[in-house]
Structure formats: structure tokens, C-alpha cells
Image (tube, helix red, strand yellow):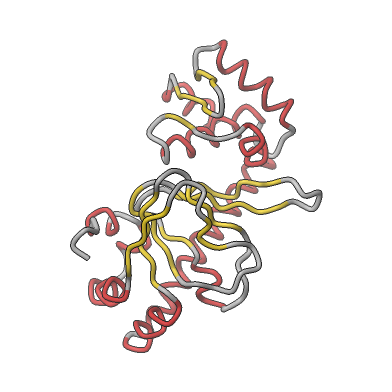
């Protein structure tokens, strides 16, 4: 595991909160994988294939709505773990996980996690805490979406996505509209307004953040 940035992994609030001995057990069982742009890590309905962390690049978690449109659930950036729910309960995957750009991942397969947990059963509680953390994030997003304006929700979505993309939000407008919870036409009007105000610059399949402080102010409305 010499090619893994241990400091980056430890900076994650979940992984960094695990006692060093249990972190070492997980890393001892982990393997690195490199994937090309668009590679599928797992798909909705697939059996669980273990726990993952992004080392470099980006992973997008997607699902389908009842009308068949694609919904972007989460952009996973370096240092962040995912895939914990099915690893814990053994049920099928609830969404697709797709590499966006060349991506390096840390993978702890199901048998490997079982070996680590046999040596330290507290790892099951650790994994449960990761499930809880992601659930709280989802509930917070739902609560904010109900009570906040479209303008504030869009600013929040752009800021979250830009933190995973170094300022350039590489995302299709359909995906961004799904994250904000609005129609694409409505999204387009608000993005154009942001562009006129000098907050962003829009190009094909990308939105570049021009004024982070002002966007943060809008997101806090």
C-alpha cells in the first residue's frame, strides 16, 4: 500500500475517526484499482462487492427515477468512502457507481472486509456510523430542499460539485437539475442569471465557478 496517501484517507471524518489499529486492519485487506472514464464499479441491483474509497479522480453515484430519467445522487471525491450500505446489510446495490475521468480506487472486497471484521468486530459499528453519516447528509439535503429557494439550492449544488472538481463542475445540465430537484428549463434560467451576475461561466458540459464567496452567500440564504 505504499502508493496510497494515508494522510488523505485519515483526513476523512469517518476513516480518520476509526482507531489506528482498525484502520490498519482495513488497509491490510485493501487493494488498489485503476479505472478508465465511464467504467462501472457496480450497478443498481448488483450484489455487494465491498467497500470503496476514491484515491484520485471522481466517482458518481446515479439512479433512475420512476419515469426512467437518470438522477445524480452523489459526486464522490478523493478521500471519501462509499458502498457501505450493501457491504453492511448484504442487500443489492441501490444505485450505479461510475468512474468519471481516470480514477484510482481503494477496494476492500466482501471476503476481505469479513476477515478484518472477524479480527475486530467493532468494524461493523464503524461501518454503521458511515451509513448514519451518509443518511444524515441525505436528510439534511431533503430538509434544505423543502425550505430553501431554487437559487440557494443551485448555489449549494454547484459548491458541492466544485469541491470535487477543483472549481470546474463537469456535469450535464440534466444531472444538475436532478440534484437541485427542478426541471432542466428552470435550471437553465437560473444558471443564465448566475452567469449574467458573474458568478459562473457556462460552457459545454461544464460550469466554472467565478465567485465562490458570493455563491456561498447565496447558498446560506
Quadrant of the rendered image containing residue 25: bottom left
In the depicted structure, whether residue 44 falls above or below residue 70: below
Place of residue 77 in the rendered image (x, y in percent of width and height, measured from the top left): 41, 48
Instruction: Quadrant for residue 24, please give it.
Output: bottom left
The residue sitting at the bottom extreme is 118
* In the foreground, 80 or 170: 170
Residue sitting at the far right: 67
Answer above or below: position of 29 versus 107. below
Q: Residue at the location (51% across, 66% down)?
A: 131
Furthest residue in direction front, as rendered: 36
Compared to 1, does 66 lie above or below?
A: above
Q: Would you say 47 lies left or right of 102 here? A: right
Front position in the image: 150 or 76: 76
**x, y percentage for residue 14?**
37, 62
Q: On the rendered image, what quadrant is the N terminus found in?
A: bottom left
Residue 195, x across and y down, in percent: 55, 15
Q: Residue 196, percent across and down?
A: 57, 10
Residue 190 image-quadrant placement: top right
Q: How many marks?
A: 0
Looking at the image, which residue is at 77% across and 49% down?
68
Please identify the quadrant where the C terminus is shown.
Answer: top right
Amino acid at each position: 500500500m505504499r502508493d496510497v496517501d494515508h494522510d488523505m484517507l485519515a483526513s476523512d471524518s469517518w476513516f480518520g475517526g476509526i482507531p489506528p489499529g482498525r484502520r490498519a486492519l482495513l488497509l491490510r485487506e485493501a487493494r488498489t484499482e485503476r479505472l478508465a472514464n465511464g467504467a462501472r464499479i457496480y450497478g443498481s441491483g448488483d450484489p455487494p462487492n465491498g467497500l470503496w474509497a476514491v484515491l484520485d479522480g471522481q466517482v458518481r453515484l446515479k439512479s433512475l427515477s420512476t419515469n426512467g430519467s437518470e438522477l445524480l445522487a452523489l459526486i464522490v471525491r478523493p478521500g471519501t468512502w462509499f458502498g457501505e450500505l450493501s457491504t453492511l446489510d448484504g442487500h443489492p446495490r441501490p444505485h450505479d457507481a461510475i468512474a468519471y475521468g481516470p480514477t484510482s480506487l481503494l477496494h476492500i472486497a466482501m471476503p476481505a472486509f469479513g476477515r478484518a471484521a472477524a479480527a475486530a468486530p467493532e468494524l461493523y459499528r464503524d461501518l454503521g456510523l458511515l451509513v448514519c453519516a451518509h443518511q444524515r447528509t441525505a436528510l439534511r439535503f431533503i430538509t434544505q430542499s423543502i425550505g430553501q429557494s431554487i437559487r440557494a439550492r443551485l448555489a449549494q449544488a454547484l459548491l458541492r460539485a466544485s469541491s470535487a472538481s477543483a472549481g470546474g463542475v463537469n456535469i450535464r445540465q440534466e444531472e444538475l437539475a436532478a440534484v437541485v430537484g427542478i426541471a432542466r428549463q428552470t435550471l437553465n434560467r437560473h444558471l443564465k442569471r448566475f452567469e449574467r451576475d458573474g458568478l459562473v461561466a457556462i460552457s459545454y458540459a461544464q460550469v466554472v465557478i467565478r465567485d465562490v464567496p458570493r455563491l456561498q452567500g447565496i447558498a446560506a440564504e
